[in-house]
Amino acid sequence: MSSPFLTLTDIRKSFGGARALERVSLELHPGSVTALLGENGAGKSTLVKILSGVHQPDGGGIRLDGRDIRIANPVAARELGVGVVHQECLVFDNLTVGENLFVNNQPARHGFVDWSRLRARADEVLRELDAGFGANTPAGSLSIAQKHVVQIARALVHDSRVLILDEPTASLSQRECAELFRIVRQLRDAGRALLFISHKFDEVFEIADRYAVFRDGVSVGAGRIAETDRDALIRLMVGRDIAQLFPRLETRIGDELLRVDNLCRAGEFEDVSFTLRRGEILGIYGLVGAGRTELAQVLFGVQRADRGGLTLNPAAAAAGIALVPEDRQSQGVVLPFSIAANLALPNLAALAPRGWCSAAREAGLAREWIGRLAIRAQGPEQSVHSLSGGNQQKVVLAKWLARRPAVLVLDEPTKGIDVGAKAAVHRVTSEYARDGNGVILISSELPEILGMSDRVLVMRRGRVRGEFTRATATSEALLRAASDA
């Protein structure tokens, strides 16, 4: 094993008295991918901001290529050869790819931008990555996956030897993930040191050579991926065994709650039919573009169907249907609002029986659900924006569970959250079904679908292509039905 190219030792960082990092250490080796693992709030984002020069550590040391350094700001990070690929694509759609690669650092000649040199260097890096597009391509015409490639290329034009990939696959399809991993391996084989941050264990074991685990701002483990397994990493992350990541409770499947007949929306899905019963978790699996999210929006009433219909059991009609959307930040919560205000929005009838919303009732409802879902927050008045992703998702769940809908539609409910928060979401989902409600679970994660569903529908290109019971649902069968093969 080569000597580490970048070493962090005893790094400390606090914000207003709250500890974010306490003596964490990390090594990144040339020609190696290191996975950084930890629950939301473990300190991963703070570490990335220190490496990118956004934050300064309160203590500890950083060594790069054998010498002590200080990363004073993002420009210093770039000059030191540290590049970051963020989960949110930081690409300007109104610029060309080449202009994006040299934002704030255009090559100049005689006081003017040297456009020929800019385009030549951009094309050189894009060819190295086998990107499939060039410097003059409008960035707005690219897919999300291609925009991630632009971010990688931006780091490479500045000769970055350390590349940080922060949740880069969160919005990518399986095919796009495979293409991104091809580039990651190419960069690793070229001798660069890569830090890969992900909540997805299958990705970690596919792409990483080494691992480091943070828990509550402290380093709790590091080593070679080949010498560990998923269960050991989970124990390090949460400090306890998760014997049942999918804690399904035994439920009695009751009478029919919802019937969907030949539901269609032009260009998105067609002739979708199924039933949902009390106490049942119905999984809907499919790849990107299968029409699952569009179906969820029609079930909730966000979009209208062109034809077909759905029928709720008359006894459940008053309780209705609720949707936990895939994009929690733009569709599930109002980020600047407090936890209490977000929970109040769909529950105003209960909180304002005479037309005036009671602040006491609002705070009481928030405290109840903060406790029931173990939301890590300072209190009901904390803004949702300041919560971790997993706790934001719990707020979205709480606001609808408090309304007690008969049917709860969950669209990618554990996307981008850590393993501990996933287990909590699964527990709440199972409890809700046990209480005689119906749950529709839409997910692209096979372990989640297989672990939580009583029945599974598989969608492909807008149509239902298969239905499976718990006994017949296997990874191979679901993938076969979801793909064109």
Image: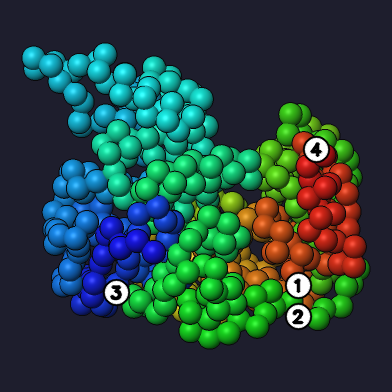
- Choose between 6 and 177: the one closer to the eye: 6
Dot 3 amino acid type: Val
In space, the residues marked 3 and 4 are separated at their CA atoms by 46 Å
Marks 1 and 2, the one that precedes in the sequence: 2
Q: Quadrant of the N terminus?
A: bottom left
How packed is label 1: few (under 14 Cα within 10 Å), some, or many (20 or more)? many
Question: Left or right: where does residue 43 sit relative to residue 13?
Answer: right
Q: Quadrant of residue 378?
A: bottom left
Q: Regarding mark 2 in the picture, which secondary structure is present there?
A: loop
Q: Secondary structure at mark 4?
A: loop
Disc 1 residue type (three-letter): Ala
| Up-down relation of residue 293 to residue 127 (above or below) | below
User: Hey, which quadrant is residue 335 in on the image?
Assistant: bottom left
- In the picture of the structure, the residue carrying the numbered disc 4 is 484
Which of the two marks, 2 or 3, is nearer to us in this view? 3
Q: Is residue 428 in view from this perspective?
A: no
Residue at x-position 76% and y-position 54%: 284
Q: CA distance from mark 4 to mark 1?
A: 33 Å
Labelled disc at residue 23: none
Crowding at dot 3, Cα within 10 Å, few <14 / some 14-19 / many 20+, comes out as: many
Amino acid at the residue labelled 2: Leu
Residue 24, disc = 3
The mark that comes first in sequence, 3 or 1, is 3
Residue behind mark 2: 249
Which mark's residue is nearer the viewer, 4 or 2? 4
CA separation in Å, label 2 and label 3: 38 Å
Please give the residue where the numbered disc 1 appears in the rendered image.
433
Q: Cα distance, mark 1 to mark 2? A: 9 Å
Mark 4 or 2, nearer chain start = 2
| Of callouts 3 and 4, the N-terminal one | 3
